[in-house]
Amino acid sequence: VISEEEPVRRYTKPIVAALALGSAALLLAGPLDPPSGPVAPTYKTLAEVEPRTAISAANTPGDADSLYRITQRGAYYLSGNITGVSGKHGIEIAADGVTIDLMGFSMFGGEGSLDGIATSGLHGMITIRDGVIGGWGEDGIDLTEGGTGESSLIEGILASGNMDHGIRAANLAVVRGCEALNTLGSGLYAIRVGTHSMIEGCSVRNNNGGGIFADTECTISDCVASFNVSSGIVADSRASITACTSNNSVFGAGFAVGNSSTLTDCTADANAEEGFSVGDGCTLLNCVATENLGLAGIQVRTGGSTVTGCTAAGNTAHGIWGGVGSTVSGCTTKGNGADGIVAYSQCLVVGNTCHANGLGASTGAGIHAFSTDNRIEGNNCTSADRGIQIDGAGNFVARNTCSGNSLNWVVAAANVCFVVQASAGGAINGSSGGVPPGSTDPNANFSY
Ligand SMILES: [Ca+2]
Ligand SMILES: [Ca+2]
Ligand SMILES: [Ca+2]
C-alpha cells in the first residue's frame, strides 16, 4: 500500500533541480528594455487561427427541411458528428463555392431523414471531403437535389446504408477515394455522376442497385465494383475506363458501356450477365472476362468495335461476341461454354488463340462466323466441338490452323477457304529436317 505522503517525497529532488535550472536561465535572459513603438496585442483572433466556419445551429441554422443550411460561399467544417431527423436533410448547400470538411466525423441520417448533404437550388463549385455519411432516408450526398450544377470535388467519403444513391454529383464532377456500399434502393447507383466527370480510386460493393453510373464523356479509373445487385460499372457513350474490376453482379453485367468508349486493363468476373457489354465503335484493350453468365464474356452489342489483347475464359456462353464489322485480334479464349469467338459479319478475326471452347451441352466452335464477309486469318483453334465453323457465304478464311477438335472444319459452300491436312515429319535434331505441311499455297489453312 502506498501512503499519501509518498508522492511528495518522490518529487522533492526533481523540483529542486528544476528551480536550479530556472535561476540559471534567468541569468542568461536578454535586455529588459521594451521594444520602441506603441504597445499592440500579440494574440491572433479565432478567425485568423481557424479561418473557416464551424457548421452549427448558430453559424449555419437550418430551415424547414434541413438541420443546417449554408447560404454564403466559403469553407465550412464539422466539429462533431451529426444525427439526422425525420423530414430533413443534414446539410443544405444554398450557395456556389462551398467547401465542407467533415473532419473525419460521421453524419448518420436515420428513418425518414432526407439527403445527408444536398444542394438547395442550382449550385456548383462544391467540395466535400473526409467523413462518413450513412443511413440517410434518401441520398448520402446529392449535388443534383437543387438542379444540375457544375464542378464539384468529392473525396475521402464513406457512404454506407443510404436509401437512394450513396454519392450523386452533377456534371464536371471529380469523385475520388470514396467508398459507397450497402445502398438500399434498387434501380439506382451507389455513385452517379453527370457528364464530363472523373471517378478515380473508388469502391462500390453490396449495393441493392448498380455500382457506378457515369453520364457521357466521363473517365473512370482504378475502381472496384463487387456484389452489386445490378451492373457494376455503367457508362454512357464516349467513356474512358481504365484499370477497373467489376465482379459478382447479382443480376447485371460487369461493365455496360455506350458507344465510342475505350476500356483498358479492366477485369470482369462472375457477373450474372456479360462481363463487358459495349456499344458501337468501342475499343477494348487488355481486358479479361472470366466466368460471366450472359451471352458472352465480351459482347460488342452492335458492331464496329475493336477487341485486342483480351482474354475470355470460362464464361457460360460465348467468349467474345464480335458484332458486325468488328476487329478481334490477339485475343485468347479458353473453356467457354459455347463459341470462343463469334464473328457475326464483316469482321476481321486475326491472330487469336481459341482452346477448349464448347464446353456446354450445345455445340461450340473456336471461331464461329454466322453470316458474310468476315476475314478470318492466322488463328489457332483447338480442342472444341468445332475448330472453325462458317455458316454463311462469302467469307475469306486463310492461314488458320485447327487441331484436336471433334470436327476441325465445318464450312458452308461459297466461302474462300482451302483446308489441307498437314503432314507431320519425323523428329528434328540439328540444322534440317521435317517435311512441308502439305501445300505451298500461302493462304492454305491446315488441320494438324
Ligand atoms: Ca431547405
Ligand atoms: Ca436527393
Ligand atoms: Ca459442347
Image: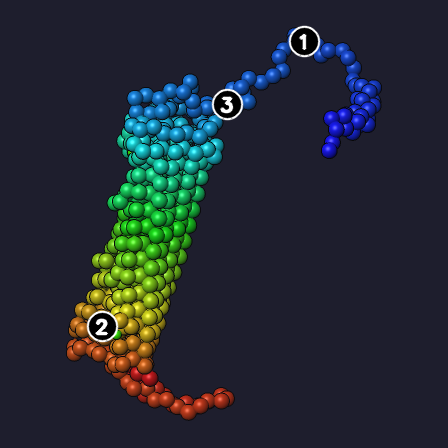
| Image coords of residue 34 (percent x, y) | 73, 11
The correct choice, above or below, for 129 with respect to 368 in the image is: above
On the rendering, which quadrant does ligand 3 occupy?
Answer: bottom left
Q: Residues within 10 Å of mark 1 (few under 14, many from 20)?
A: few
Q: Quadrant of the N terminus?
A: top right
Q: Residue at x 41, y 29 (%)?
A: 82
Which circle marks residue 362 in the picture? Answer: 2
Residue that label 3 marks: 51
Q: CA distance from mark 2 to mark 3?
A: 70 Å
Three-letter amino acid code at the position of disc 3: Pro
Quadrant of res 169 = top left
Mark 1 Cβ inside 8 Å of ligand 1: no
Q: Nearer the viewer, residue 140 or 223?
A: 140
Q: Is residue 288 visible from the viewing direction of this image?
A: yes
Three-letter amino acid code at the position of disc 2: Ser
Mark 2 Cβ inside 8 Å of ligand 3: yes
Q: CA distance from mark 1 to mark 2?
A: 97 Å
Three-letter amino acid code at the position of disc 1: Gly
Secondary-structure class at tag 3: loop
Residue that label 1 marks: 37
Q: Residue at x 33, y 84 (%)?
A: 448
Q: Earlier in the sequence, mark 1 or mark 3?
A: 1
Q: Residue at x 65, y 7 (%)?
A: 38
Quadrant of res 246 = bottom left
